[in-house]
Image (cartoon, rainbow, N blue to C red):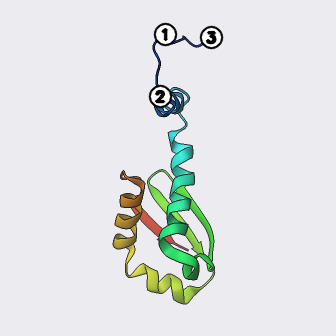
Amino acid sequence: MPKRHNEHISIKDALKEFVETNKLEKGLDKVNVAEAWAKLMGNGINNYTTSVNLQRETLYVQLSSSVLREELSYGKQKIIDMLNEELGKEIVKKLILR
């Protein structure tokens, strides 16, 4: 049974402790990366995005347009930097467009 804290703590601290205790950070990072991709890329690119998957430190993005895939491949490092800045920590180190 988990220990009880006698002092009052904020909800933010309680949730952070819960995530760390149950090792849920990697799963939350996967969800946050997908949301960041959708937010940063906008509707034009999201219409052609079929899946966004984070495995270890590599982000796999599947696109239905080969022309868009080629165009995005020129700015891979910029996309990685934008995603990491949006997430507030360095989660993505490599981007693979499929």
Compared with residue 69, is residue 26 higher up or lower down, i.e. above or below?
above
Which is more foreground, mark 1 or mark 3? 1
Occupied quadrant, residue 77: bottom left
Residue 71 or 83: which is nearer the viewer? 83
Under mark 1, the amino acid is Asn
Element at badge 2?
loop
Occupied quadrant, residue 75: bottom left
Instruction: Tell me if mark 2 has few (under 14), some (14-19) or many (20+) residues whose alpha carbon lies within 10 angstroms of its own.
Output: few
**In the displayed structure, does residue 88 sit left or right of residue 49?**
left
Q: Name the residue located 40 percent from the left edge and 60 percent from the top edge.
A: 86
Element at badge 3?
loop
Q: Quadrant of the N terminus?
A: top right
Element at badge 1?
loop
Under mark 3, the amino acid is Met
**In the rendered structure, which disc, 2 or 3, sits on the residue that comes first in sequence?**
3
Which disc is residue 1 wearing?
3
Residue hosting label 2: 10
Compared with residue 25, is residue 11 higher up or lower down, i.e. above or below?
above
Residue 61 or 32: which is nearer the viewer? 32
Q: Name the residue located 60 percent from the left edge and 85 percent from the top edge.
A: 65
Q: Quadrant of the C terminus?
A: bottom right
Compared with residue 64, is residue 3 higher up or lower down, i.e. above or below?
above
Give how far across and how far down residue 84 sits, in percent. Answer: 38, 58
Real-space Cα distance between discs 1 and 2?
Answer: 13 Å
Give how far across and how far down residue 15 sits, in percent. Answer: 52, 32
Give how far across and how far down residue 31 sits, in percent. Answer: 57, 53
Q: Name the residue located 52 percent from the left edge and 54 percent from the top edge.
A: 32
**In the rendered structure, which disc, 1 or 3, sits on the residue that comes first in sequence?**
3
